[in-house]
Structure formats: structure tokens, C-alpha cells
Image (cartoon, helix red, strand yellow):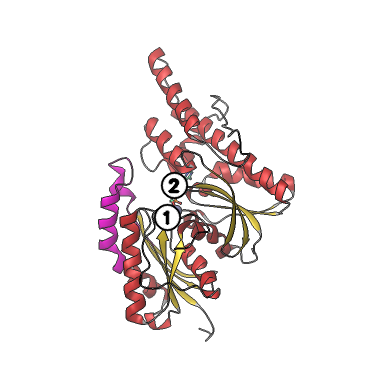
């Protein structure tokens, strides 16, 4: 270890993954431990906030210990501790924030609060060592759909956001409606490979007063209406065709808005982030669209797209370099907006 290396211990508990990681100089992942609660929530068809908080409490110390151990470090080697403090489920966030505050105080290392979406965007820095702002990023997760200009590290201009459901939320709701269960995104992605994306025409929603905002609730209703009407007429539904046609409708809108932004802002670098960014159809469509426009396309590996702490370590590193430190009054902020600091 070089003396000037910045080693960040990162913690993420905003939803249903208890995660800790050790990240060196912002881009080198020394360990990335994720304890998923998916199996626990599956029986309820979605994340139950109270269960998530309780499970985080059970797991957090063990996950942090494992992250340090598998990186071959002790707390003495850690430069700073970074933790997601919003947005997310308040009880879940509080577990990570409290653990990070305790470690910071006990080990005498600085505390850095990280915005969860900023973490998702920063996942792109880990495997793309040459990626530097400015670039356009499409953030599509279970709770958020944002199209942003990453102007600099920690500096964002939001071009568009969803007016209703987030992209991942739409995947989860449609998956439930066609009997695939939770979590819907990966299941639709898999089943859709067997289906015909042109089989059913679902709407590509436009938002009247914004070319960059998204709206997915109309699409979700169109799928539900289609299912009801098939049921009433006694027509059997093809899970694979519904999944493929729905997925294509989401992907078409995401790609169109993204390429409009790339064109208008004249930036030749484009990245994706968030759980839905691991969708194979979206990745393929964006590879093609970016190649056609001569735009360099960056995307994290699927494991760095869904919730993890390595991305929080990457974002925390750039905050550390900018001199950002938090006090022990750091709290969980369930509705923290991108670019906002608390
Ligand atoms: O970023 P993430 O792990 O958590 C949030 O911050 O919300 O995103 C989770 C979302 C879920 O809605 C999940 O269904 C979706 O990402 N997702 C996918 C895929 N993998 C995860 N959606 C579509 N295709 C996938 N392969
Ligand atoms: Zn997330």
C-alpha cells in the first residue's frame, strides 16, 4: 500500500441489500460484499421496510468485517468511511448511517455521507478507468429514473425524471401481474428472450411539456388492460410475448430520450446506471444506438448496476478529494434529491 493511497470503507443499506466494500483511490475495488435480502421479501411480493431494517441490523457488522477481511485491511488502514444517507427507506438507511458514525468515532476516521444515486452513477468509474466527466448518464433503478448531465464529480444537471413510476418499479409491477413474482426486472429480462417484442403494441409514453421526462404508469396500465381483456375473452396469454413487448416499450423510450440528450448537449460520452441498467435488451439497444451516433458508451457490470457498496466507495472518494466531511449529526434523508446535500 502506497502512503498516499486513499482507502475508503463504504456502507450501503438504503433498500434490501446490506453491503460493504473497500475501494482504493476511487476506482479499485479491494472487496465488495453484498448480503441480499431478496429471498426474504419474495414471499411478500416486494420489499417490506420493517423487515429490511431488522435484517440490516442483524447483518451490518458481519458484512463490514467481511469487507475489511477480504480486502486484507484493518480499520487502521482506512482513510475515511463513506455511507449512503439517502434517498431510500428511512429505517434501512439509519442502520448504515449509525454503523458508519460509530466506526468513524471509534476509529477516528472521517465520515462522508453519499447520495445513493450519485453512487449508482459513480459505479461507471470503477471499470472504466478512463471515464471522466462531463458525460450524460441515464439512471434507471427501482425508485428512480433520471437523465442527467454529469458536469463534474459531484455536479449534476437533471434533464429529465419520471413523472410517476420508476422504470424498475414498472418492471416489478408488470412481472407481478404476469405471475413472475419479485424481483421483476431480472425475471422479465430472462423470460423476454423467449418472446416476440413485436407481438403486442404497448404505448411509448411522451410527456407533453418535456422531451426528457419519463412516464411509465400508462404503460403499466396498458399491460394490465391487455391482461384483463385476454382473460375476459378467454384468450391465453404468452408470458414471454407480454414480457418482451413491455420490455421493448420501456427500452425504446429510454433509448430515444438518451440519444436526444446526447445529441442536444453535444457530449460524446454516455453512461448508464442503476438496477435496470443491467437489462440485456437495454444494453444491446444502447450499444447499437451509441455506435450509430459515434458516442462512447459506458456501462458497469451487472453486479455494480444493482445496489452495492463499491459504488458508494467510488462516489465517497471524490467527495473526500473535494474536502467534504460530515459530522455526527448526519441523518438518514429518505427523499434526498440528486445534487442536494444535507
Ligand atoms: O438500483 P437498484 O438495485 O435499487 C434501487 O436503487 O432501486 O434497482 C433495483 C431495480 C428493481 O426494480 C429490479 O427489478 C430492477 O432494478 N432490475 C432490472 C434488472 N435487474 C434489476 N430491471 C430490468 N432488467 C434487469 N435485468
Ligand atoms: Zn439503488
Q: Are marks 2 and 1 in contact (CB under 8 Å)?
A: yes
Name the spot of residue 97 as percent of width and height, x first: 35, 65
Q: Tell me the mark number nearer the camera, choosing from 2 and 1.
A: 1
Q: Is residue 233 above or below residue 177?
A: above
Determine if the C-beta at disc 2 is less than 8 A from ligand 1: yes
Circle 2 packing at 10 Å, graded few (<14), some (14-19), many (20+), is some
Q: Position of residue 32 (x, y in %)?
A: 43, 65
- The residue tagged 1 is 87
Q: Which residue is mark 2?
A: 143
Distance CA(mark 2)–CA(mark 1): 9 Å
Q: Residue at x 56, y 64 (%)?
A: 154
Residue drawn at x 57%, y 43% as measured from the top left: 282
Range drawn in magenta:
34-62
Residue 104 against residue 121 in the figure, above or below: below
Local SS, label 2: loop
Q: Nearer the viewer, residue 321 or 129?
A: 321
Q: Residue at x 53, y 56 (%)?
A: 301
Q: Residue at x 34, y 75 (%)?
A: 103
Does residue 99 appear to the left or right of 109 in the view shown? left
Judged by its main secondary structure, the magenta piece is helix
Left or right: where does residue 84 sit relative to residue 219?
left
- In the image, residue 188 sits, relative to residue 127, either above or below, namely above
Q: Secondary structure at mark 1?
A: loop
Front residue (pair 63, 9): 9
User: In this image, 220 relative to 95: left or right?
Assistant: right
In front: 212, or 12?
212
Pick the quarter of the image with the C terminus: bottom left
Amino acid at each position: 500500500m502506497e502512503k498516499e493511497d486513499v482507502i475508503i470503507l463504504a456502507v450501503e443499506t438504503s433498500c434490501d441489500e446490506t453491503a460493504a466494500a473497500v475501494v482504493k483511490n476511487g476506482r479499485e475495488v479491494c472487496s465488495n460484499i453484498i448480503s441480499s435480502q431478496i429471498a426474504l421479501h419474495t414471499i411478500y411480493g416486494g420489499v417490506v421496510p420493517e423487515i429490511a431494517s431488522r435484517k440490516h441490523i442483524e447483518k451490518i457488522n458481519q458484512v463490514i468485517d467481511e469487507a475489511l477481511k477480504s480486502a486484507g485491511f484493518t480499520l487502521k488502514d482506512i482513510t475515511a468511511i463513506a455511507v449512503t444517507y439517502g434517498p431510500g427507506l428511512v429505517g434501512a438507511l439509519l442502520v448504515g448511517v449509525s454503523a458508519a458514525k460509530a466506526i468513524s468515532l471509534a476509529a477516528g476516521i472521517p465520515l462522508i455521507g453519499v447520495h445513493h444515486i450519485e453512487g449508482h452513477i459513480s459505479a461507471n468509474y470503477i471499470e472504466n478507468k478512463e471515464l471522466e466527466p462531463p458525460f450524460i448518464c441515464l439512471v434507471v433503478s427501482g425508485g428512480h429514473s433520471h437523465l442527467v448531465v454529469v458536469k463534474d464529480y459531484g455536479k449534476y444537471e437533471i434533464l429529465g425524471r419520471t413523472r410517476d413510476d420508476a422504470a424498475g418499479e414498472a418492471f416489478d409491477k408488470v412481472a407481478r401481474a404476469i405471475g413472475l413474482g419479485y424481483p421483476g426486472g431480472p425475471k422479465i429480462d430472462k423470460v423476454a428472450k423467449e418472446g416476440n417484442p413485436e407481438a403486442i403494441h404497448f404505448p411509448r409514453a411522451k410527456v407533453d411539456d418535456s422531451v426528457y421526462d419519463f412516464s411509465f404508469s400508462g404503460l403499466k396500465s396498458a399491460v394490465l388492460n391487455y391482461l384483463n381483456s385476454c382473460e375476459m375473452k378467454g384468450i391465453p396469454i404468452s408470458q414471454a410475448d407480454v414480457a418482451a413487448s413491455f420490455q421493448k416499450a420501456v427500452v425504446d423510450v429510454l433509448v430515444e430520450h438518451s440519444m436526444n440528450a446526447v445529441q442536444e448537449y453535444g457530449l460524446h460520452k454516455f453512461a448508464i446506471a442503476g438496477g435496470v441498467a443491467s437489462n440485456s435488451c437495454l444494453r444491446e439497444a444502447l450499444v447499437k444506438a451509441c455506435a450509430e451516433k459515434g458516442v462512447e458508451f459506458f456501462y458497469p457490470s451487472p453486479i455494480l448496476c444493482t445496489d452495492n457498496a463499491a459504488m458508494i466507495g467510488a462516489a465517497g472518494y471524490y467527495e473526500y478529494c473535494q474536502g467534504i466531511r460530515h459530522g455526527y449529526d448526519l441523518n438518514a434523508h429518505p427523499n434526498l434529491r440528486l445534487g442536494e446535500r444535507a
